[in-house]
Amino acid sequence: MDTALATDAVRCERVSVRFTTERGTVTALENIDLTIPRGSFLTLLGPSGCGKSTLLRVMADLIEPSSGKISVLGDVPETARLNREIGFVFQDAALLPWRTVLENVTLPLEVGGGKALPGARSPRELLELVGLAGWEDAFPHELSGGMRQRVVIALALAGEPRLIVADEPTTALDVVVQAQILALLRRAAQARGAAVMLITHDMGVVAETCDRVAVMYAGRVVEAGPVRELIRHPAHPYTAGLMASVPSLEDGGGRLQQIQGSLPRLGAVPRGCAFHPRCPKASARCEVDRPELALVRRTRAACWWPLTEGWPR
């Protein structure tokens, strides 16, 4: 196995998802390329309806891609991979109310045939890892929202996954508990060598928690790279507009910038670059040819005219 394969947890290659509707075929995802190293934290950013949750469900093997390939890499035996390579952490994830905390965390082992992988932590050890030692015999209704999310994280880790997918896991929690849950998720993933793929709308979470960011627009990744580079030096005009719309202490209370126009419907994505009707840098080429991701400084951006000085003012 080469070095890249040894350090990557998940690889997504040219993945597309198409749905057939009464009005025809709708492309929800188009040619998605992503690589997530082991122990890293990747966040998906973008407007509602851009394909983030669809991509998360494809990565979690809940939706089969129409084309392309998802590879969850590592040394998990083939007979154990189906139920163990993916861990799920969703907002308000349901726990079985008639089972105790320990019985809920034991469930993945029951589904997997009752056998843990060599070296795997026991359910009690997982509860201790997430800070719930002593709560094994409690029932879900006896726990706070933050405690229930800790149980969900223990559940996600029970199968020794290579990938943990988390869809807005802290939205209903207060700020302090949000920080605790995300820090816990990060530590637990790093300890097990798992990658985390997260959807959140909280830029504070992105800046403080994540290693890498992938920005999506109209079913495509338009920019991806290290979080600090992407926040400070966005190359794609949509990314730059997104960053300019986030309030900052340095703004002095001034007006926030906004991106004119609206996201196209998935059934009516314009030809060429999907962002061109809203982009102040758009040219005739942008209306015809769709750009691919290419390296711009330290991020990859799908833009014919990547920015070098930020969003036009």
Image: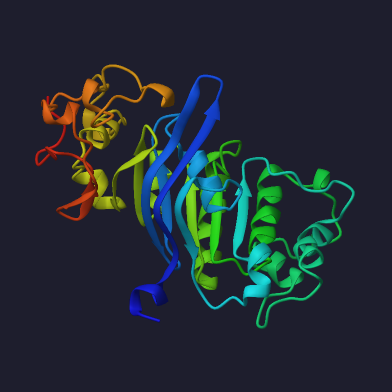
Q: As drawn, which residue projects farthest toward the right?
A: 98
How far from the left and from the top, in percent, is residue 296?
15, 50
Q: As drawn, which residue projects farthest toward the top?
A: 261
Quarter occupied by the N terminus: bottom left
Q: Residue at x 65, y 47 (%)?
A: 146
Of residues 97 and 286, the one nearer the viewer is 286
How far from the left and from the top, in percent, is residue 185?
55, 58
Q: How is the image coloured?
A: rainbow
How far from the left and from the top, in percent, is residue 201?
44, 36
Left or right position of 256 against 160 = left
Q: Residue at x 56, y 65 (%)?
A: 188
Report how many numbered discs are placed on residues in the image: 0
Quarter occupied by the C terminus: top left
Of residues 289 and 235, the one nearer the viewer is 289
Q: Residue at x 51, y 66 (%)?
A: 194
How far from the left and from the top, in percent, is residue 41?
43, 57
Of residues 81 and 307, the one nearer the viewer is 81
Q: Is residue 207 visible?
A: no
Of residues 157 and 80, the one nearer the viewer is 80
Left or right position of 46 against 84 = left
Q: Is residue 39 visible?
A: yes
The relative height of residue 88 versus residue 82 in the rendered view (above or below) is above
The relative height of residue 63 versus residue 278 in the rendered view (above or below) is below
The relative height of residue 40 versus residue 47 in the rendered view (above or below) is below
